């Protein structure tokens, strides 16, 4: 049997695989539970809550989401907001209430590409839409997710540079599956997880 040299291609490939696994584990570490409105959700640990001034740097509109989480690099984000007057989305016979949003996105910019729509979640039904949009000259991967808890409609978004979507997609789906209706015991959820 030959001795493996540190400069051997196989050794290099094994080390790269270990680094990739560490990064993947870091990105899918679901962190702690966060309460928003009448729900709780596990946000991946690499996303940190954002305060007002930093949020204003990202979202120029004054109608920015109420809650935002960003990675340290500020290139990936998750937002949550309560929708007011969202009944128009919940039409009889519509399989996914994000269908009107999909049509609106495609109408606003013909470069927008909608990839898929579906539903996730056990306790809370979460409807989602994934698509590619454009910001300046950059392509952006987006997932919009919509759900009801109690009397509230909540809209969430995830975004990242398009070239990074395969790195984050599993964490986003895992996050959507953690959405629960908040109760008095929600603060104990981290100990139970």
Image: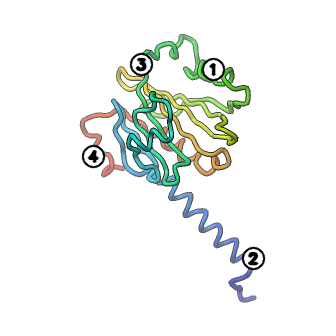
Q: Which mark is in front, 1 or 2?
A: 1
Q: Which mark is in front, 2 or 3?
A: 3
Residue bearing mark 3 = 84
- The CA distance from mark 3 to mark 4 is 30 Å
* Lower position in the chain sequence, tag 3 or tag 1: 3
- Which of these two is toward me, 113 or 176? 113
Residue at x 57% of width, y 23% of height:
98
Q: Quadrant of residue 123?
A: top left
- The CA distance from mark 3 to mark 1 is 18 Å
- Which of these two is toward me, 108 or 25? 108
- Place of residue 160 in the rendered image (x, y in percent of width and height, measured from the top left): 59, 44
Q: Is residue 22 above or below residue 12?
A: above
- The CA distance from mark 4 to mark 1 is 40 Å
Label 2 CA crowd tier, 10 Å (few <14, some 14–19, many 20+)? few
Q: Secondary structure at mark 2?
A: helix
Residue bearing mark 4 = 188
Question: Which numbered marker is on residue 104?
Answer: 1
| Residue 25 left/right relative to 151 | right
- The CA distance from mark 2 to mark 3 is 57 Å
- Place of residue 88 in the rendered image (x, y in percent of width and height, measured from the top left): 51, 13
Residue bearing mark 2 = 9
């Amino acid at each position: 049997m030959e001795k493996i040299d540190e400069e051997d291609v196989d050794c290099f490939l094994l080390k790269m695989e270990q680094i990739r696994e560490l990064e993947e584990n870091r990105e899918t570490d679901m962190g702690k539970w966060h309460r928003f409105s009448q729900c709780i959700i596990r946000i991946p640990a690499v996303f940190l809550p954002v305060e007002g001034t930093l949020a204003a740097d990202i979202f120029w509109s004054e109608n920015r989401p109420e809650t935002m989480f960003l990675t340290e690099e500020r290139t990936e984000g998750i937002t949550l907001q309560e929708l007011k007057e969202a009944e128009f989305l919940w039409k009889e016979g519509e399989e996914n209430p994000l269908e009107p949003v999909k049509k609106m996105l495609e109408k606003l910019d013909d470069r927008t590409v909608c990839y898929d729509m579906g539903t996730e979640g056990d306790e809370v039904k979460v409807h989602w839409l994934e698509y590619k949009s454009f910001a300046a000259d950059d392509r952006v991967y987006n997932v919009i997710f919509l759900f009801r808890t109690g009397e509230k409609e909540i809209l969430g978004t995830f975004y990242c540079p398009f070239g990074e979507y395969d790195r984050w997609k599993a964490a986003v789906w895992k996050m959507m599956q953690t959405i629960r209706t908040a109760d008095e015991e929600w603060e104990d959820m981290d100990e139970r997880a």
